[in-house]
Amino acid sequence: MIFLTKTYAEINGKIKNGEAVVVTAEEMVSIVAEKGTKVAADEIDIVTTGTFGPMCSSGAFLNFGHADPPIKFENLWLNDVSAYHGNAAVDCYIGCTRLSDVKRFEYGGGHVIEDLVAGKPVRLRGNSYTTDCYPLAEVDTEFTLDDINQAILCNPRNAYQRYVCAVNSSDRTLYTYMGKLLPHYGNAHYAGAGCLSPLSNDPDYETIGIGTRIFLGGGIGYIIGEGTQHSPSSQFGTIFVKGDLKQMSAEYLRGVTYEEYGTSLFVGLGIPIPILNEGLAKKTAISDAELFTDIVDYGIPRRDRPKPRRINYEELKGEYIHLNGKKVKCSSLSSFYHARKIAETLKTWIQDGKFFLNPPAETLPTTTIFKPMKQTLKLNFVKDLKKKAEICYEDCDIKEVARKIITENINHIVITDKNSILKGIVTSFDVTKAIAEDKKDLGDIITKRVFTTFDDEPLSNASRKMKQNKISALPVIDENKKVTGIITSEELM
Amino acid sequence: MTIINVSIPFGLVKDIDDYSKVVNDILKHDITFNILKFSTGSAGLNLLLDIPEEKVKTITESLIEKNISVNKKGRVIVDIDLCIDCGSCISLCPTDALTFNGEERLKFSYEKCIGCLLCIDSCPRFAIEEL
């Protein structure tokens, strides 16, 4: 049984009288180290947390009021970003990762939300199939946040308890939601505020649940339940939050673009944790050195990516991390400066008697399992579709390659040495070009830097590789670079 | 090793032989060096070279003699109003021109920037631009 040393009512009473002792989760680390959990639990009433990072699962419900004559939207766009309409006539949901139909990656739903909060006018275009009660077919207007009825930030998954550290083992630069990842473990990116991270400071969710009042986007918001993909057993808890966009500030809601990935929204979020007992004093004193996460290799484009090792936030916040005996430059994707500012702001609100704690009606579940997608179609691999590669040795002449192209009625000849080790590829186009340019030597027309695939690569990944590199075939090789077949765009069609 | 930015005006390089002469001029200082980047700008060719520290002075002098300009100037600017101090650019900067200051705000040291431009497309706020 947990012995309650304080209640919400007592703490709120202290806030009202301006007597509540509030510290940030960063300050709590040294307070507990110095005074111990018992004294800290007695002296400290509330620990504030904060985080400011990209949260792709963010968006807002908007209600525009009725037009005259009335319209029931079928499609609508806010600054050329399509918003979801599938409920009542003039409601919509603008999601932060939706790209502008016009500017694409430069501007998305996250930017629309930032512009609205900043007080900028936003263009609304919409159309309808029309009904007897909603006869208007088109709307093209401009509005600001003040002009509309409700504007509710409603994010189904925010404030991940911790997040992974991303690296890239592949041989090309990757553009991901974890930012730009250089090849051959060239850099590392992590997210999360470490010791200030809200859910990490109450990992058993003793004080966090439906109804918890929080700092959201510079205003007051509420937790309305567990977030999607909430995974408490692996310390990847998440929360579902809502708040009134009209109270919020563009300083804490920022639209962002990750090159070649898409748009998102930086959300500022902070949770106050009441120190109801000694256990909570101990939990909120968690330091960066005690918070661990996984390094994950994004070079492998599968759901279960390799995890080279565990790492704590103290090492992540240093300039370099150590991986495979190499120093890898590491930096964050989320802002610790702003996370600290959020925790400090929330602290001031409470000290000033402007923010009271709300006990949750129900705390977050601690046993939810995060399941993978059920896929009814069998996943196809390269080995399921590969065919025999037609091979010529590296010392053969162009004529022999040409003959093989004709007799086998194919476009790609794989060039190997006598041990079947891949040396290059020659296409029917290369041979044609050789004739046009009067080239006689295979060495003049062979492509030596060949993109390859392997038996266990999903077909969709192999096909993306071809599309990205504008090529029409991939030799299939084994771990010793021996050619075991070929896959061409014809098989994939 | 130190990185220098070498700008060769178009008038000086008309063909590949002229280019070889410039490279040979550097090689004659009996060094090995890396060409990190080769690009063309409005004024001429730009080479980003990684050369031994102790040879910077002599190489710079001999290049300047031939009207080739050498500088260590940065080639990007950071718009602090757009920056949100996330840090995405820091891990991409090979010379620590982009770092956090003591309170985790982004600090850009212009004099350390070598213009590799790796950071530009890493910024989620389009706050970094080529000068």
Image (tube, rainbow, N blue to C red):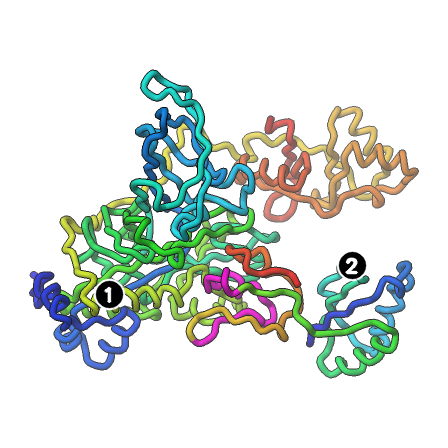
**Amino acid type shown at disc 1:** Trp
Q: Chain of mark 1?
A: A
Against A58, is A33 above or below?
A: below
Residue at horizontal 7%, vertical 61%?
A1
Q: Main secondary structure of the magenta part?
A: loop
Residue A131 image point, x, y percent = 36, 17
Q: Is residue A363 magenta?
A: no
Residue at image x 79%, y 29%? Answer: A404
* Image position, residue A175 (x, y; %): 54, 50
The magenta span reads B80-102
Classify A317 as above or below A1. below
Mark 1 residue crowding within 10 angstroms, few (<14) / some (14–19) / many (20+): some
Question: What is the x, y in percent for residue A430?
Answer: 81, 36
Residue B96 is inside the magenta segment: yes
Judging depth in this view, the residue of A102 and A397 nearest the camera is A102
Give the residue drawn at x 81%, y 34%. A401
Q: Which residue is mark 2?
A: B42
- State which quadrant residue A185 falls in: bottom right
Task: Decide: is B104 above or below A374.
Answer: below
Q: CA distance from mark 2 to mark 1?
A: 55 Å
Mark 1 lies on a secondary structure that is helix
**Residue B114: x percent and y percent?**
66, 69
Q: Quadrant of residue A392?
A: top right
Tell me, for residue A349, which label it has, or none: 1
What is the chain letter for disc 2? B
Q: Nearer the viewer, residue A482 or A486?
A: A486
Query: What's the residue type where badge 2 is placed?
Result: Ser
* Disc number for residue A239: none
Q: Is residue A362 left or right of residue A398?
A: left
